[in-house]
Image: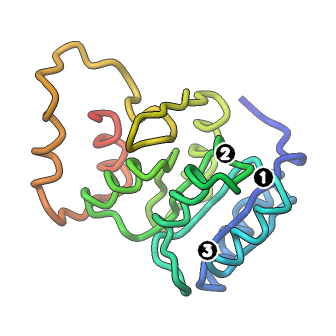
Amino acid sequence: MTYKLNNVACLVVESNQNHMQLIKEVLRPLGITKVADATNAQVAIAYLENNVVDIIFTEWHMDGEMDGIAFVEWVRKNPASKNVFVPIVMVTAQSEEWKVIKARDAGVTEFLVKPFSASTMAKRITVVIENPRTFVRTDDFFGPDRRRHRVSNYTGEERRKDLLAKGDQVMDESSVEELLKEL
């Protein structure tokens, strides 16, 4: 389905100027022209204190005191955040399985592995639009429902621990998608 995205406001949080420019260049042909940028989490937070955006693209590693995970947690949990329900796409080369899980558990909506194609970026945006996720609040989590589908053969409370024990397995884009389907 084709969408008119000219009214979508995005925030790109990326310390590397070349990567930031690449993301912005990929968004433009999709019709997204309202793009603010921030070179670190502190600049992004200052922007979000006065603005509401429709989608955030953030890197895991950033210059400054906060990394992308801490930034996502601020957006989701800080009382000063006006954007707690905003879709957040983690755009990063940090594709180890435990990092994908950590990003999801911090409240990331989608995960995009660098290097990425314009088509893959468009797919993530389409998923955010067509499949908005309900939000869940527990004692230690607030964010989009981490379950992408119902699992009929659920075997108990600790079933994800074995996934975390796999360690630093680096995954490509299709592996990330498969992992997220399992969770």
Q: Are marks 2 and 1 in contact (CB under 8 Å)?
A: yes
> Which of the marked residues, 3 or 1, is nearer the chain's N terminus?
3
The nearer-to-camera label among 3 and 1 is 3
Residue 4 percent across, percent down from the top left: 85, 39
**Which one is in front, 6 or 152?**
152
- Which quadrant of the figure has residue 162? top left
Three-letter amino acid code at the position of disc 1: Val
Q: Residues within 10 Å of mark 1 (few under 14, many from 20)?
A: some
Relative image position of residue 22 (x, y in whole percent): 66, 74
**Badge number at residue 178:** none
Residue type for callout 2: Val
Q: To which residue does mark 2 refer?
A: 86
Identity of the amino acid at label 3? Ala
The quarter in which the N terminus is drawn is: top right
Q: CA distance from mark 2 to mark 3?
A: 16 Å
* Residue 109, percent from left and from top: 52, 45
Decide which of 66, 34 is in the foreground and name it: 66
Residue for badge 3: 41
Q: Residue at x 89, y 46 (%)?
A: 7
Q: Tell me the SS state at disc 1.
A: loop
Q: In the picture provided, is 43 more to the left or to the right than 102?
A: right
Per the image, the residue denoted by label 1 is 53
- What residue sits 79% from the left and 35% below the top? 3
Q: CA distance from mark 2 to mark 1?
A: 7 Å
Figure check: 68 above or below 132: below
